[in-house]
Amino acid sequence: MTAEELDGLRSEIDGVDVRIMDLLSRRLDLASEIGLTKRKDGLAVRDAAREDEVVERMVHLGRDRAVGDRVSRELARLLIESAVETQNGPGELPLAGFNALVVGGAGRMGEWVCRFLSNRGVAVKVWDPRRRIEGYEQVDSPTPNAADAHLVIIASPLGAASEDLRTVLDCGPKGIVFDLCSVKSHIAGILRESVAAGLKVTSVHPMFGPGIPTPRGFNVLVCSCGCDESDRLVRKLFGDAGAHVRSVVLEEHDGLMAYVLGLSHLTALLFGSALNASGRSVEVFRAVQGTSFDRLAGLAREVSLESRRVYHDIQSLNPNSKAMLEGVADALSELSEAALDRDATRFAEIMDRQRDYMEVF
């Protein structure tokens, strides 16, 4: 083996180490969230039966991957002790004494924000005229709850958010109101008007779905509507939980999301639809897949499991979707012509442009 080949293998190990540490950090984040739940519900940090289950599961996972039992057991015990240490953190819940009304709390993102707030000590009530959710106090009307709550969070479906937001604002809330909408154009005017009327309002967009247990390491966008007090509170709320809080101009939000969300979803759906149209089963493709196919297939699978209504609303309610889709059609036309051209020049030029544009990634 040459020195260059040895360096190449060592470099690959370095890359694996980075992924291991990323996963370890994520595991500790999950353990911390579980710790908050245990503290809120008065449960013991340690659970001997669960710890034994984790160890045995790790041993079996190791055997399937040619990892020795001793290594698997020692690793499992080390992970358990790290989790226990994380869960034995400060005893006081960070938002104890706060109360919140979650509007649309029975939806998936509504459930997420209920748990997120409750785990941090917030007394949560839910108003959702469409569904009910177990584990939280349900109210039949936003009045007087919206007026008196420290926090009012609009987690309603996109199509219902503007009506629910107006209903809440008509209650004259004294606390801070913010939405979680992934499209803002249809509520931007209401948000601006409410701040001009003296209400404490801002707009938030968590850049993750309800399957993410904790926002640590993920982006949370804050679109200021002109109320500094509201902006500071939500930045602290999510920043203290480890999120990367980013400021985005309210009127520019949807133009960005047409590509960050709309194009990403569309690409995954296009990939899956093209495979389906091939007439071959997905098992046939999986048997011969490569790394690029594996990554795209995983994304297509994830998108296919998401809410049909939410993903359609992200496309249809965003006024910038039309321009994005026209750009996609133009790009696909150019790629199609270049791919079928015997001369590789145009195809290479497209790849060069993409390399230069995507260099920061």
Image: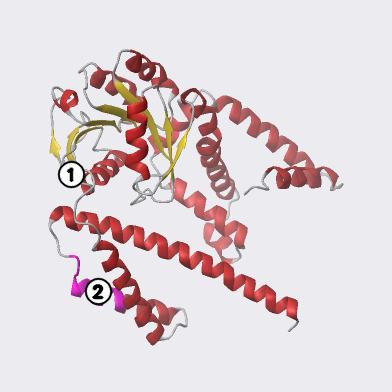
> Residue 51 has which mark?
2
**Mark 1 neighbour class, 10 Å CA radius: few under 14, some 14 to 19, many 20 or more:** some
Q: Which residue is drawn at 27% across and 23% down?
A: 164
| Nearer to us in this view, 174 or 161 | 174
- Colour logic: secondary structure
Viewer-proximal residue, 59 or 249? 249
Q: Which amino acid does label 2 sit on?
A: Glu
**Upstream in the sequence, badge 2 or badge 1?**
2
Image location (x, y in percent) of residue 295: 56, 56
Please count the marks in the image.
2
Report whether 346 appears left or right of 241.
right
Q: What element carries label 2?
A: helix
Against 267, residue 317 (above or below) is above
The residues colored magenta run 45-55
Q: In which quarter of the image is residue 190?
A: top left
Dot 2, how many residues are within 10 Å of its Cα: few (below 14), some (14-19), or many (20+)?
some
| Left or right of 123, for residue 311 | right
Distance from the alpha carbon under mark 2 to that under mark 1: 30 Å
Please report the residue visible at 33 percent of the width from the left and 21 percent of the height from the top. 162
Determine which residue is flagged by label 1. 96
- Quadrant of the rendering where the N terminus is positioned: bottom right
Residue 156 at x, y = what percent? 30, 31
Residue 181 located left or right of residue 33 = right
Position in image of residue 275 (x %, y %): 58, 50
The residue depicted at 19 percent of the width and 74 percent of the height is: 49
Is 98 or 123 nearer to us in this picture?
98
Relative to 233, is 75 above or below? below
What amino acid does circle 1 point to? Answer: Ala
Q: Is the magenta stretch mostly helix, strand or loop?
A: helix
Whether residue 155 appears in magenta in the rendering, the answer is no
Report whether residue 33 is seen. yes
